[in-house]
Image (cartoon, rainbow, N blue to C red):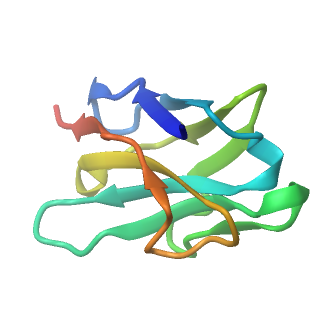
């Protein structure tokens, strides 16, 4: 049974950093595409950074690539977020897919909230 559990969200001041973690179980991490997505207030869900299966390419949202970066660890995926802005406030989700990165991934975690505010 595929499980994804996010953690690391919270309240941070503008300009600050956070590192989100997604602990995975029930599947071999390298065999799946896995990444981070977010839902900000009033906006559609969007991809932040996604790692292709089998150590393939990493896809980053163009407007976030200079501040956000995903990485893969031992049964976990991380999202390093730097120079956070108030518009980054939202819920961040870890998601996995058997084939490739896209907005309708097969499996989703419950999300971790991030609030950027002074």
Of residues 19 and 53, the one nearer the viewer is 53
Image coordinates of residue 117 in percent, x first then y, are 18, 36
Image coordinates of residue 19 in percent, x first then y, are 52, 29
Q: Count the numbered circles shown.
A: 0
Of residues 78 and 30, the one nearer the viewer is 30
Image coordinates of residue 91 in percent, x first then y, are 26, 47
Q: Is residue 10 above or below residue 78?
A: above
Q: Give the position of the C terminus as an image quadrant.
A: top left
- Residue pictured at 67% horizontal, 63% vertical: 98
Specify the farthest residue to the front.
Answer: 1
- Residue pictured at 64% horizontal, 49% vertical: 69
Image coordinates of residue 85 in percent, x first then y, are 32, 49
- Residue pictured at 31% horizontal, 53% vertical: 88
Q: Give the position of the N terminus as an image quadrant.
A: top right
Of residues 84 and 70, the one nearer the viewer is 70
Q: Is residue 86 above or below residue 37?
A: above
């Amino acid at each position: 049974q595929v499980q994804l559990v996010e953690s690391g969200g919270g309240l941070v001041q503008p300009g600050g950093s956070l590192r989100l973690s997604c602990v995975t179980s029930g599947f071999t991490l390298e065999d799946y595409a896995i990444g981070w997505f977010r839902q900000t207030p009033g906006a559609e869900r969007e991809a932040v950074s996604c790692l292709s299966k089998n150590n393939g390419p990493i896809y980053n949202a163009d407007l976030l690539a200079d501040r956000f970066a995903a990485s893969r660890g031992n049964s976990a995926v991380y999202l390093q977020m730097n120079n956070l802005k108030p518009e980054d406030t939202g819920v961040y989700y870890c998601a996995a897919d058997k084939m490739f990165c896209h907005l309708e991934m097969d499996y989703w975690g419950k999300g971790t909230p991030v609030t950027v505010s002074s």
